[in-house]
Image (spheres, rainbow, N blue to C red):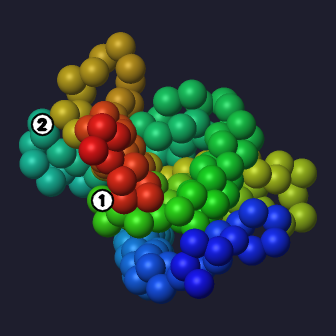
Amino acid sequence: MRGLQAEGGAPVAGPAAAPAAKRRTRLVAVLVALAAVVYVIDVLTKTVVLRALEGKAPLVVIPDVLQFRVIFNSGAAFSLGTGMTIVFTFIAAAVVVAIIRTARKLLSLPWAIALGLLLGGAFGNLTDRLLRYPSGFGRSTQFQGHVVDFIEVLPGHFPVIDYFPVFNVADSSIVCGGILAVLLAWRGYQIDGSREGK
């Protein structure tokens, strides 16, 4: 009965649909697992750093190259766009929803990795925006929590921008996922596993 169509013109699911569905399930599992790992690492590192360094001098890891310094960021990744907290909260929520919707078409492992990195990072910073000061349940400043940033590279080498770049694990994950997504799109790799021009 291959080739028949269901009422309304939709193709009848054939034997070929089963392997695709299984592959999609596996890739969504990869996406979710990677997002969960990123999220847990982000939350744990922020918790540890806050307990160890909040209100204290920076912890120098490699002199003039890397140090840990706690700041509370009301802006976007790498402390950009401060003062627009609520906007970035809704952008992060929209990214999460978009990734979840896109996962229905997922048949590419590289895209699963890219989306997993983006989702984990977005969830990490979104948690801060929803739960950290000055946000929180019952407060008038909902969706305006400040993100904890603590990784500072080349400290003191950016005098024009006082604290650039200070970031966290979620920011790193978002940037890596975004770069991978751009490279995949540039090379023509589609989320459904196909490739443009092939």
In-front residue for pair 121/127: 121
User: In screen coordinates, is 67 left or right of 165?
Assistant: left
Image point 30% across, 59% down: which residue? 110
- Work out which residue is located at the far top of the displayed protein and give it: 160
Residue at position x 21%, y 23% in the image: 157
What's the amino acid at mark 2?
Asp
* Number of dots carrying numbers: 2
Circle 2 packing at 10 Å, graded few (<14), some (14-19), many (20+), is: few
- Determine whether, in the image, residue 136 is placed left or right of residue 103: right
Q: State the quadrant of the C terminus.
A: top left
- Give the residue drawn at x 10%, y 48%: 62
Q: Position of residue 72 (x, y in %)?
A: 53, 46
Q: On residue 110, which mark appears?
A: 1
Element under disc 1: helix
Query: Residue 64 bears which disc, if any?
Result: 2
Q: Amino acid at mark 1?
A: Pro
Q: Earlier in the sequence, mark 1 or mark 2?
A: 2
Residue at position x 68%, y 32% in the image: 84
Instruction: Name above or below for residue 122 compared with residue 182.
Output: below
